[in-house]
Image (cartoon, rainbow, N blue to C red):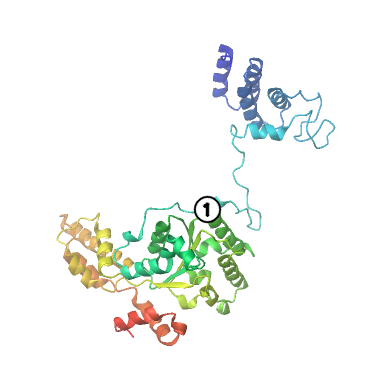
Amino acid sequence: MPAESPLIQSMRTAVTAAPDDVPLRLHLAELLLDAGHMESAVAEVAVTLQHAPGDARARELMARAMGAPAPVTGAPTVPGTSPAGTPGSRAGFDWRAAEDQVGDVVPPRFVEAPLTVDGEGDPGDAAAWDVERPGTLRLADVGGMQEVKERLEAAFLAPLRNPELRRLYGKSLRGGLLLYGPPGCGKTFIARAVAGELGAGFLSVSVNDVLDMWIGNSERNMHEIFRTARRQAPCVVFLDELDALGGKRSRTQSNGMRTTVNQLLTELDGIEAAANEGVFVLAATNVPWDVDIALRRPGRLDRTLLVLPPDGPAREAVLRYHLRDKPVENVDLRRLVKVTDGLSGADLAHVCEAAAEYALLDSARTGTVRMIGMNDLSAAVRQVVPSTEPWFAAARNVAMYANEGGMYDDLVAYLKKKRKL
């Protein structure tokens, strides 16, 4: 390719200084054409057409650069029409092919379609939903809770890790896992760890992601979420607060909520036999007794796992984590773990924050900065009321009078162990 002349280089400098000057850029494109720099000329004309889509001279230069004959003088300049004004190619020039050729040179003018007046858009793009890439979090990063890990391994992870044994025993991968228990005990954290174990993406779904004020949009949102997960499989779909997304239809007055639950049931089943291949559904709720019974049917969320307040090793891990960046001294973790029995992970985080506040206020009052000590942590523990107690009060009645089919046997065993039943 011949080198650019000093005149062309000077014109490039002028165009850089005035990028919106259409005649100047077209003059540069014409010089490039005359000098045999066809690709450079196409790029310059394409930029011009972004600023002036109907410019006749720009279209003439594009036709020359692409090797087509120039349009007939006086021909209409409307794209996609012939000189007679009828749809078709103009003078044999394929504008669609030209658009494809310069697509990587000129960015699209619009990157998303505006919503219509009824709130509808086109959510079909997989990027419309935020699927987190496979993370490094594993079950080994979850402190303590050994029983929970063993149940996860037996009920969910082992069949996935051993496809040969799964085929030998005819073990199906259909169905999902429902995590339930008091709030603040790490259900979401465990779900992320499971996604890490599977090497899968993570798509967290809450009621705000699904429900919409426009009729039919909630069902469509639910469908698009699962379609995105299928496109980006392997993927874990985590349904947070399942009682809000899949509450009992018999108690729901809203027809929109009932149809949303129906759509969720359809997505869990999959329209085709292998529709949900590589899509793993996990859900979490504090009130499993409010979840529609159809969601618990075999093949759907048919495995349940009770996530209780952290045990001793888990409490130690949580306390170490929340105190790691704080100025502490002489903290007796063994004693602290003992006196925090029954607190949730969220409660333990609050204990650490409250202890830091005590030390901060004392330092501000005395004018002497001091470290966070055991006295601060002990005082914080005395002030924190376990947030799990109201939950156990409600769960006790369910365990005693509504344990059909042994659904809450794990909960009954725990309550008996703690002498709460």
Task: Describe residue 146's horizontal placement relative to residue 202 as left or right.
Answer: left
Q: Give the side of residue 419 with respect to residue 244, left or right.
A: left
CA neighbours of label 1 inside 10 A, class few (<14), some (14 to 19), many (20+)? some
The residue positioned 70% from the left and 35% from the top of the image is: 96
The picture quadrant where one finds residue 79 is top right
| Amino acid type, residue under disc 1 in the picture | Gln
What residue do we see at 21% from left, 72% from top?
338
Above or below residue 124? Residue 319 is below
Element assignment for label 1: loop
Direction bottom: furthest residue: 401
Q: Residue furthest right?
A: 84
Q: Which quarter of the figure is the N terminus placed in?
A: top right
Looking at this view, is 366 or 159 the one in front? Answer: 159
Q: Nearer the viewer, residue 335 or 153?
A: 153
Tell me where residue 7 sits by quadrant: top right
Report the residue marked by disc 1: 232
- In the depicted structure, whether residue 200 falls above or below residue 69: below
Furthest toward the top, the residue is 6
Where is residue 392? Give x, y as percent: 36, 79
> Relative to 227, does residue 177 appear above or below in the rendering?
below
* Quadrant including the C terminus: bottom left
> What residue is rendered at 57% in x and 79% in y?
250
Residue 379, quarter of picture: bottom left
Q: Residue furthest front?
A: 168
Q: Is residue 239 visible?
A: no
